[in-house]
Amino acid sequence: MGEGAGKTAKAEKRRFYEMARGSTTEAVTQLAVMRIRQLISAEDYRRARGLLVRIAQMLSRLCGPPRTT
């Protein structure tokens, strides 16, 4: 995400923000695996998942409206 913030071209910024959003989605999946394997508590899972959902929402806003092709 930091690399995308340094870009000046709008399309290039969007691409980096979209990649960061994808990475956030992957992190949610890994978090679920950790919970299933009981590597983290239910409370830690809930808190971390809430933060990741919020981050994904912010990245979605940075990406702008969906592209139409």
Image (cartoon, rainbow, N blue to C red):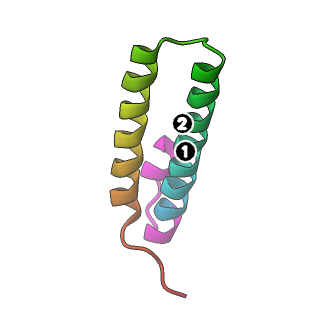
**Residue in the image at 40% along x and 25% along y:** 46
In the rendered image, the quadrant that contains the C terminus is: bottom right
- Quarter of the image for residue 63 reads bottom left
The reply to whether residue 6 is in sight is no
Q: Which residue of the protein is positioned furthest toward the bottom in this rendering?
A: 69
Residue 10 forms part of the magenta stretch: yes
Q: Is residue 5 above or below residue 34?
A: below
Secondary element at image label 2: helix
For the residue marked with disc 2, what is the amino acid?
A: Val
Q: Give the percent coordinates (x, y) of residue 7.
A: 47, 57
- Quarter of the image for residue 37 reads top right
Contact check, label 1 and label 2, Cβ < 8 Å: yes
Q: In the image, is 19 to the left or to the right of 44?
A: right
Q: Using the image as rendered, state which of residue 11 and residue 41 is in the foreground.
A: 41
Q: Using the image as rendered, state which of residue 39 and residue 52 is in the foreground.
A: 39
Secondary element at image label 1: helix
The reply to whether residue 23 is in sight is yes
Magenta segment, which residues? Answer: 1-12
Q: Give the percent coordinates (x, y) of residue 59.
A: 40, 51
Q: In the image, is 54 to the left or to the right of 19?
A: left
Q: What is the distance, in whole Å, between disc 1 and disc 2 at their CAs?
A: 5 Å
Instruction: Read off the residue under disc 2.
Output: 28
Instruction: Read off the residue under disc 1.
Output: 25
